[in-house]
Amino acid sequence: MTTAKTVAFHTLGCKLNFSETSSLSRLLEQDGFVQTDFEGQADVYVINTCSVTDNADKECRYLVRRIQRRAPESRVVITGCYAQLKPKEIAEIEGVDLVLGAAEKFNLVEHLKNLTKGDSAKICSCDIEQVNIFHASYSMNDRTRTFLKVQDGCDYTCSFCTIPMARGKSRSDSITNVMEQVQQIAESDVREIVLTGINLGDFGKGLQGGKKREETFFELIRELDKVAGIDRYRISSIEPNLLSNEIIEFVANSQRFMPHFHIPLQSGSNDILGMMRRRYRRELYAEKVALIKQFMPHCSIGVDVIVGFPGETDAHFQETYDFLHALDVAYFHVFTYSERANTAALEIQPVVPVHVRNERNKILRNLSHKKAQYFASQHEGETRKVLFEKFHKDGVMEGYTDNYIKVTTPVRAEWANNIIDWKLS
């Protein structure tokens, strides 16, 4: 009897990457592969990379070295954003056998049929301008919630960002195809779907059958709200300039879309936003937060912010701190600026010293912690609905309220993947 081939995956980066890795794993399982744990032995290791920060690049190299020590005869495949941006650099890493760019990622099965352990890595990539196909993806069996990719790529030119170079032009699925995916997910006992994309609010762009679509993100969520079998939807991240008032009002009146938004800010200084080439100013951002809170006082709002961007003075940083301090938001994701090749930000002076960047990161993370505590305290004594995770650790399970407050409790198996009325304390 022939032993089944084994494959192990590791994902770096965003929720969209996780959805794509899950889809890749299903493709390989259909071809006869058995998925195994990344920390164990496997015939093939696939690393789906990110390249938003320098740490993601370094982690990829670290993972390859670990595989080399553990399983030197196994084949190693690198795909994702880092693979598209720097394929030759990755190919030079000892132990890498195959580098798949953005256009070849979903042809992994075919590439593996002809892949042998050799002396040099094979690169299968193309110019990002040629990447114009949308590949539907969703995660499954990883968590109680599913990450569903409905959009890919970005047409923005933010001066710090490599994503358009790694992902290509904005393109998306059709509403019809998304609905079919959601029906499949609903049949798998999933209770919550997180809509993901690189620039989610840009949904509707892209070529489908040779014609430019005119669908919108608002039209998508309006249709999804009608699907039976899915209890909850979340919008993973949406640009403030694309978060229309009709989207906010719709979520406020929906029973299925959760009162939870994640809205990138990046800086609370208009000067810095201009240098970042962001498509809004802080005044618009504040207006969106105020409108959300007007319709949904209980809504959780998360913020992305970058510290240490070139040209960010102490005064600019103080503007950001004061702006965030005054905003009625629940938490931040704080990123320390790191130089990325071929981005316009490299031309901006003066460069902020690394130790100053790190100190500013720490200051905002401390503020975020206080914001999160305050937001949770506002809801103490309320009874809210919590979806508990299937998985648990050390006798403890966790879940999230509709407005994204984390709840932990001793394991009760009957609560897993169920929505429970929970009194917050």
Image: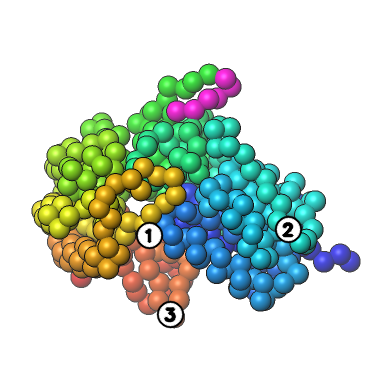
**Numbered range of the magenta stretch:** 205-210
Earlier in the chain: of badge 3 and badge 1, it is 1
Q: Could you tell me residue 214's position as x and y percent?
A: 43, 22
Name of the residue lying farthest toward the top: 211
Q: Mark yes or no: residue 191 visible.
A: no
Q: Is residue 263 left or right of residue 110?
A: left
Instruction: Tell me the CA gap for discs 3 and 2.
Output: 47 Å
Instruction: Tell me the CA gap for discs 3 and 1.
Output: 17 Å
Disc 2: which residue: 120
Amino acid type indicated by mark 1: Leu
In the image, what residue occupies the spot 53% across and 19% down?
A: 211
Amino acid type indicated by mark 3: Gly
Q: Which mark is residue 395?
A: 3
In the image, what residue occupies the spot 50% across and 44% down?
A: 166
Earlier in the chain: of badge 2 and badge 1, it is 2
Earlier in the chain: of badge 3 and badge 2, it is 2
Disc 1: which residue: 387
